[in-house]
Amino acid sequence: MITGGTNGIGKALARHYAELGDQVVAVGSSEEGGRRLREEVPKAHFVRADLSSLRQTRDLVERLSTEHPVIDALVLAAFRFNAVRVETDEGLEHTFALYVINRWLMAEGLRDPLENAPIPVIINLCGAGQGGKIHWDDLQMKDKYRGLAATMQGAAASELLGTAYFSERTKYVLYNPVFVATGLHEPFKQPLRGLVRVASAVFAQPVAKAVPPLAALIDHPPAKPLTTWKKGKPIDLAVDRNEARRFEETIRTVTQSALP
């Protein structure tokens, strides 16, 4: 099960496992992305959903739980960089809704199908270990929004939510692929767009090279409940468990307010 499965690393993983004969469900936000997936990875099953929408995510979780009572791996890869502040129809800052709340809802909502698998694992593709900061006084970044700050907050949120996640069976993996050529230049305006495109062409790791270490973690999940990896190598994170629990409760409250 792959969110953000129609582009970048998500699509590459979908292709990898579909070619092995595994059942792959790739979730994406656009029909165009689904069309490309069907052309390039015809054995994968496409499901369309706006993952920045809490209501659509809730409905998606219910549908997936019914249609797929056993999920071996949940890959959380949906992300979009917003250079300017964008608000969802539910009144949430888009990066926070997609990068933070959606990932929490997916992991929590699909607990039962994951627990039914022999060796279940959650792979959260994020910027773990990059020193992100939670803006406790302005989680929605209504004051002085900056795209990079919103992205870094999402990375820090992944660290906290991964720490707060508890399961005796399902392993939780925070994976930072670092700089991968996945169309990072597209959200920017010129001339910055051109500069990012050139930097990506010169320095970014090809998507195909990002797949093997991820596939190894999916096929053979680590023994520890939570591990953090950066470009295929394990790293140590010092995350305050009390802060993690506080953040999870904050997300729960925000979600309940948005989904009465």
Image: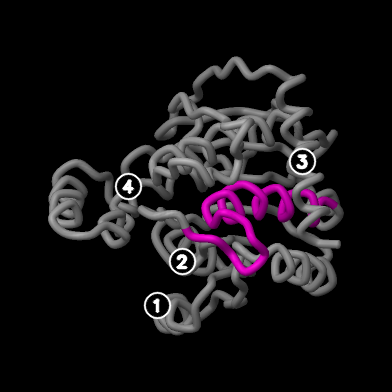
Quadrant in which the N terminus is drawn: bottom right
Local secondary structure at mark 2: helix
Report if the CB atoms under discs 2 and 1 are less than 8 Å apart: yes
Is 56 above or below relative to 105? below
Segment colored magenta: 86-111
Local secondary structure at mark 3: loop
In the image, which disc is placed on residue 122?
none
Whichever of labels 1 and 3 marks the residue nearer the N terminus, that label is 1
Residue 57 seen anywhere in this rendered image of the structure: yes
User: Which residue matches tag 3?
Assistant: 170
User: Which residue matches tag 1?
Assistant: 40
User: Which residue matches tag 4?
Assistant: 180
Whether residue 166 appears in magenta in the rendering, the answer is no
Local secondary structure at mark 1: helix
Q: Residues within 10 Å of mark 1 (few under 14, many from 20)?
A: few
Whichever of labels 2 and 3 marks the residue nearer the N terminus, that label is 2
